[in-house]
Amino acid sequence: MTTSTTLPRRVSYRFSWVGMIGFAIILFWAVIALLAPHITPYPVGEIIDEDYFGPISSKLLLGSDYLGRDMLSRIIMGARYTVGISLAAVCLACFSGAALGMAAAVIGGWFDTLLSRLLDALNSIPSKLSGLVVAAAVGSSLPVLILMLAVIYTPGAYRFARSLAVNVNTMDYITVARTRGEGIPYVVFSEILPNITGPLLADFGIRFVFVVLLLSGLSFLGLGVQPPYADWGALVHENIGGLPFGAPAVIVPSLAIASLTISVNLLIDNLPKKIRDRST
Amino acid sequence: MRTYVLGLITNRLGSSALTLLIVSFAVFFATAMLPGDTATILLGQAATPEAVAGLRAAMHLDEPALLRFGRWLIGLLQGDLGISYVNNVPVAELIGARFVNTMRLAGIVTLFAVPLSLTLGITAAMFRGSVYDRIVTILTIGIISVPEFMIATSAVLLFSVYLKWLPALSFASDVTSFWQVLRIYAMPVVTLTFVVSAQMIRMTRAAVIDTINTPYVEAAILKGASRRRAVLLHALPNAVGPIANAIALALSYLVGGVIIVETIFNYPGVAKLMVDGVSTRDLPLIQSCAIIFCVGYLALITFADIVAILANPRVR
């Protein structure tokens, strides 16, 4: 957003190779999630191995699960649920959090105080606990899961966006825009938002990791994605009986989660400073 | 200035109390939103209209939600946690012994995690940028990025499947010797220590590095003090507040970790009770457990903030 003509127009960001690896793995999972039904070697629900918790073989690349279903196919379909649900939830959380945060910073006064107080209080409920309470009260269908994850991570997104927006709000050009008679929506979306996009995107990535971890944790407890569907956490839950045998069916889904979350963290950590710390 | 500090602390305590009120409100209404009528669900087959009406009256279900919330809150304050839907036992009785178990687990973890994290965090900050520091940083980021159950399952794979040192996912009830206690606690404690320490190491390292970057430590290094002397004698005394703050904050990660660890290792604690309560939809039990965890979490965070206030010489 270097529209000023006095500045040299160099937008060439330098990515480190660690960040590139992270990005490549994220892209890999995104493609898998998109193409999932077309690339599974076997139908997801079909029992094809008479042995359960089968080892890695040339026929079943990642072994079989507790019923003798192909693990690779289940991981590939699981990517859909883990990535899809988390992405939907984090988009909702970051959008509403950022909108509310910027609005609070611009409007100020009692609106800001009230909203901040309320959301800070909600933020002090440990995330897994809210998950348990909601799962007990309304069950865990996919829409409920997405909405719940979004609500749990909205206060964090709000707090982050608000603190950034408060800094920008003191700038001269905001005062100019206000004196010009611009309304709140204009100030929020045309003056503040462009100046905090970078950090907001980095925050989006970090929050995505949180959502993936919480979703996996809940599914692991058997309270997240319900059968017949299974995300990666639910796959660990289903196959936990194979742990004493060291079955690949328990280990591989965990590795899939780890590869995704670590990659996002690596990418965010290695983002060019220009993107991450724009507001300072 | 003393009254000023006291004022700050009372202010903080007051805001915690208000937060707790909002939190309990949220917990109560999340569980009160249950689709379907509680009395009908509870009675099941025996749900004749008269029985349902009777139970509704007995449980005060006909009163407005706000009134029930008030009644519930007052009960909580008096130590009356309600009666379990599932087995008709006072919730307080169910929780009692298990609460001690959970606190014991948390206590043991704290005992291991704090010295370990302080050593690693401070030394990593001391040798910032070295290979050692990079290894510590990468390991902590790795642990923070993976779900807790992965650490637990890895511990089981390593210690009981490959090395065969410890029994796998079982929590034996017949404990006769100290050795057995040790074997039983080993894996839950190792898992939780990993989860909490990773956070604690990161925060401690950041706190110490913040003080190392100050002009007075730079001055100490310029006058010829060794790196060790500069960190231990000049930086560390000023980092005590932020470090204590980091410890309290990191310990709040126990709440999330304990839910997973107690479930996977079948540990008879409050978290396991709550997870079981969720599958049977035992609402009074869930509400009480949720409040207990929220109070614990809030207490740690409030404590961290108070330490930060006390440790800041500018307000003292």
Image (cartoon, rainbow, N blue to C red):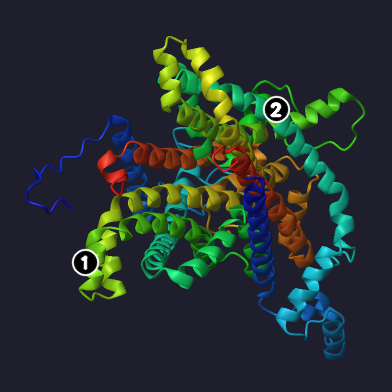
Callout count: 2
Residue type (three-letter) at the residue carrying disc 2: Phe
Residue type (three-letter) at the residue carrying disc 1: Val
Q: Is residue B107 left or right of residue A31?
A: right
Extreme-right residue of the structure: B176
Extreme-front residue of the structure: B1
| Vertical relation: B50 (above or below) B260 | below
Front-lying residue, A80 or B136: B136
Extreme-left residue of the structure: A5
Residue A176, numbered circle? 1
- Which of discs 2 and 1 lies nearer the camera? The answer is 1
Residue A50 screen position, x and y as percent: 59, 43
Residue B112, numbered circle? 2
Which residue is drawn at the image coordinates 51% and 54% (left, top)?
A45
Residue A270 screen position, x and y as percent: 33, 36
Residue A98 screen position, x and y as percent: 39, 62
Q: Is residue B185 left or right of residue A266?
A: right
From where the camera sits, is residue A152 visible? yes
